[in-house]
């Protein structure tokens, strides 16, 4: 493995990635992106979202090279949807967990059906919006 970046260059790239994350999520991340090298020489970049109720991890990307990990992180951030799209997806995940919990504890079907229908309609709207945007 040929690692040609200096620690300063890695820090500069992490700052660029952090700036791009701030632009996408329109908030300060809970933690700055961090760079990790394991004993086998594999590299990873850990990226975080804004402070919230405990779900801080945005993404972790891995590569066999310093450059590869940083390039993958930059590519991931560049491909992130806008903040409002992320918020819609997070809402759907939360709604899905509520529906699952309701089903697990035996909430009556007639109470759960409106939530399930709402989730389905929102999911279809998000998919339609994505197709229009591309």
Image (cartoon, rainbow, N blue to C red):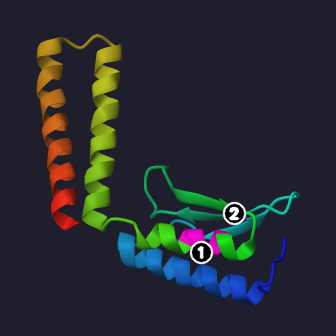
Label 2, on which residue? 63
Q: Residue at x 81, y 78 (%)?
A: 3
Q: Residue at x 80, y 84 (%)?
A: 4
**Mark 1 nearby-residue class (10 Å; few <14, some 14–19, many ≥20):** some
Q: Earlier in the sequence, mark 1 or mark 2?
A: 2
Q: Which residues are magenta?
A: 69-73
Quadrant the C terminus occupies: bottom left
Quadrant the N terminus occupies: bottom right
Is residue 32 visible in the rendered image? The answer is: no
Drawn side of residue 30 relative to residue 44, left or right: left
Tags 1 and 2 touching, CB below 8 Å:
yes
Label 1, on which residue? 71
Residue at disc 1, secondary structure: helix
Residue placed most toward the observer, 71 or 123? 71
Q: Residue at x 43, y 56 (%)?
A: 52
Quadrant housing residue 43: bottom right
């Amino acid at each position: 493995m040929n690692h040609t970046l200096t620690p300063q260059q890695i820090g500069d790239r992490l700052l660029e990635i952090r700036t791009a994350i701030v632009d996408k999520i329109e908030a300060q991340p809970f933690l700055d992106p961090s760079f990790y090298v394991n004993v086998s020489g594999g590299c990873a970049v850990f990226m975080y979202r804004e402070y919230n109720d405990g779900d801080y991890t945005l993404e972790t990307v891995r590569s066999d090279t310093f450059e590869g990990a940083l390039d993958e992180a930059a590519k991931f951030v560049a491909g992130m949807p806008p903040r409002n799209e992320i918020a819609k997806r997070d809402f759907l995940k939360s709604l899905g967990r509520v529906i699952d919990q309701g089903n697990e504890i035996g909430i009556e079907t007639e109470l759960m059906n409106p939530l399930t229908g709402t989730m389905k309609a929102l999911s279809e709207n998000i998919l339609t919006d994505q197709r229009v945007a591309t």
